[in-house]
Amino acid sequence: MEAYNEKVIDHYSNPRNVGEIENASGVGEVGNPVCGDIMRIYLKIENEIIKDVKFKTFGCGAAIATSSISTEMIKGKTVEEALNLNNKDVVNKLGGLPPVKLHCSVLAEEAIKEAIADYYRKEGKLSEEEIIHKCNLKCSSDCCNCNDIQEENYT
Ligand code: FES
């Protein structure tokens, strides 16, 4: 198997923003359907800006490295900017991952989107359907093809 590059090893051995935030504005937790690993992310949002972000990941080195670098990528950004982060940007920022580890990078993107959805739910301004579409979450209905689009992210 291809080895991890130095940047991945750096983020894996010295992950940034590990921990929890008390009274977080939004918390998101996702499990990776491929391996069963879990990531939880905490956001502190003020005036639509992500003031602080912390994470806990129970997963492999690639999952920890992508979680770590994604928190750096969204800190100080607007909620809208954070919603635009995708796993390919994260992998590029890390300088690449071995192909068999690409699925691990999806955890961070999805956990951030879940945490923002949690924030919107607490705010109470948007309907559940609006939140699902805005945050690009998997929906349980057949209203659109968003589930199919998301499945492509795992390949
Ligand atoms: Fe589970 Fe990487 S093997 S997240």
Image: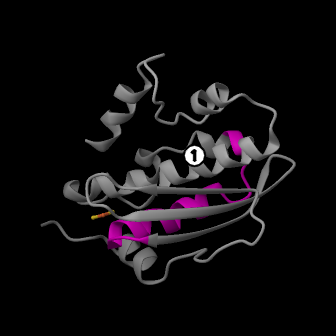
Quadrant of the image containing the C terminus:
top left
80 horizontally vs 104: left or right: right
> In the rendered image, is residue 129 in sight?
yes
Task: Identify which residue is drawn at 58% across, 32% down.
Answer: 132
Magenta run includes residue 70: yes
The answer to which quarter of the image holds residue 129 is: top right
Residue of label 1? 113
Please, which colouring scheme is shown? one colour
What's the amino acid at mark 1?
Lys
**Residue positioned most to the left:** 1
- Would you call the spot at circle 1 few (<14 residues within 10 Å), some (14-19), or many (20 or more)? many
Chain part drawn in magenta: 58-80
Magenta run includes residue 1: no
> In the rendered image, is residue 91 in sight?
no
Task: State the predominant SS element of the stretch in magenta.
Answer: helix
74 horizontally vs 3: left or right: right
The answer to which quarter of the image holds residue 76 is: bottom right
Give the secondary structure at mark 1: helix
Of the pair 112 and 29, the residue shown nearer to us: 29
Please provide percent x and percent y for residue 147. Answer: 39, 29
Task: Decide: is 7 above or below 94.
Answer: below
**Residue positioned most to the front:** 141
The answer to which quarter of the image holds residue 3 is: bottom left
Of the pair 101 and 113, the residue shown nearer to us: 113
**CB of mark 1 near ligand 1 (< 8 Å):** no
Task: Identify which residue is drawn at 61% across, 77% down.
Answer: 19
